[in-house]
Amino acid sequence: MEEFKKILVLENEIEARLLDSVLNERNIPHRIRSYYDSAYDGIFQAQKGWGVVLAPLQYQEEIEAIYQDLPLEDSGGDERKKDED
């Protein structure tokens, strides 16, 4: 089984759903994990972003390219974060 690594950070649920749809359509193995935790009432999402995309590293460039091409509104500068780990 392939090991999944953190590929990039998502800022909101809309990005997550849209990216998930495109990745499923292209049969790219991935998981999307939200940072939401009801015990902490979403505090981690305010600090770390909405969640992350996990996938095998061999798909990283393709996923990042797809993410950059998503038709999302930009709110003054490119605030999309890539994983820096």
Image (cartoon, rainbow, N blue to C red):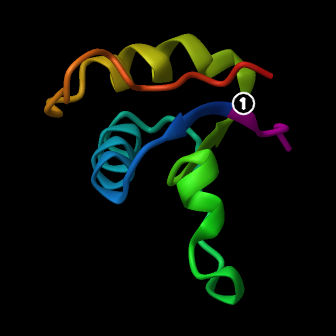
Q: Is residue 60 toward the left or the right of residue 2 in the image?
A: left
Which quadrant holds the N terminus?
top right
On screen, residue 52 versus residue 18, left or right, reads right
Quarter of the image with the C terminus in it: top right
Residue 81, image x, y percentages: 51, 25
39 lies above or below 79: below
Within the image, what quadrant is residue 41 found in? bottom right
Where residue 75 sits in the image (x, y, percent)?
Answer: 19, 30
Q: Can the viewer see residue 38? A: yes
Q: Residue at x 62, y 86 (%)?
A: 38
Q: Position of residue 14 (x, y in %)?
A: 27, 54
Q: Is residue 62 above or below residue 72?
A: above
The overriding secondary structure of the stretch rendered in magenta is loop
Residue type indicated by callout 1 = Pro
Left or right of residue 55, residue 11 in this image: left
Does the magenta portion include 59?
no
Residue shown at 36% from the left, 58% from the top: 13
Residue placed at 65% from the left, 61% from the top? 44
Quadrant hosting residue 74:
top left
Q: Residue under circle 1?
A: 56
Give the total number of marks visible in the rendering.
Answer: 1
Q: Is residue 32 visible?
A: no
What range is drawn magenta here? 1-6
